[in-house]
Image (cartoon, coloured by chain):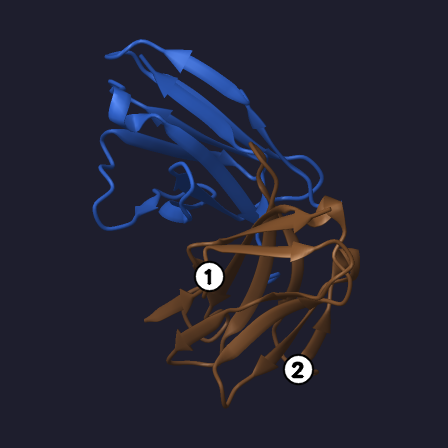
Chain colours: A blue, B brown
Amino acid sequence: GAVVSQHPSWVICKSGTSVKIECRSLDFQATTMFWYRQFPKQSLMLMATSNEGSKATYEQGVEKDKFLINHASLTLSTLTVTSAHPEDSSFYICSARSGAIYEQYFGPGTRLTVT
Amino acid sequence: AQSVTQLGSHVSVSEGALVLLRCNYSSSVPPYLFWYVQYPNQGLQLLLKYTTGATLVKGINGFEAEFKKSETSFHLTKPSAHMSDAAEYFCAVSSAPFGNEKLTFGTGTRLTIIP
């Protein structure tokens, strides 16, 4: 149980284009989803927290107009990187939790390469 | 505010030897503590967690950790290393449900197993 999937697992896009990453909870309802960014050989940095049906809460320094997060249902959250640039290349990982269970279940990650 | 310090970005042990990965935390409220493992190009897998109760926590793959409040530590150990243990390990802290549910990660420790 508690499986989180991400799609795509790897994406290459050209500079200036937008790319959407999906995060799905497969066997539970995710009231809260989290988006992290991980640079090579570094730790995970929280980008934003989203609750189903509400606007996402972004961490300090994260551009909300560049990283659009939508959590429209209890099983799906999306992260759209708009007008991507090479410096946005990174490993993006989502996690999800359900209700009062204070444990986050992590997705397998999406590697974004912007050329 | 909360933070995590992992001593040693790289640890190498011989196969069959004791594994000890160090984690110290800082939290203004009683912490929830976690150890995650990450294999290359994959998301995070929970090894074990401490919330309340018994301070010695046993996890998957033979790992265990002990919460020591007086030392603000949560070190991860395994009596006998296996080649499959080679991975990146992250310690994390959360203040939920006493405060912020966000996970704050340490910088990670890369574990190498010497045959």
Q: Chain of mark 1?
A: B
Q: Is residue A22 above or below residue B65?
A: above
Mark 1 lies on residue: B8
Q: Nearer the viewer, residue A14 or A6?
A: A14
Answer yes or no: do the residues labelled 2 and 1 have beta carbons within 8 Å?
Answer: no
Q: Secondary structure at mark 1?
A: loop
Q: Nearer the viewer, residue B83 or A3?
A: B83
Q: Is A59 left or right of B34, judged from the image as shown?
A: left
In the image, which disc is placed on residue B29?
none
- Amino acid type indicated by mark 1: Gly
Front label number (2 vs 1): 1
x, y percentage for residue B98?
46, 76
> Disc 2 versus disc 1: distance between alpha carbons?
23 Å
Tell me which residue sits at (22%, 37%) in the image: A63
- Amino acid type indicated by mark 2: Thr
Q: Nearer the viewer, residue B74 or A80?
A: B74
Q: Is B36 left or right of A40, judged from the image as shown?
A: right
In the image, which disc is placed on residue B55?
2
10 Å neighbourhood of mark 2: few (<14), some, or many (≥20)? some
Q: Secondary structure at mark 2?
A: loop
- Which badge, 2 or 1, comes first in the chain's sequence? 1
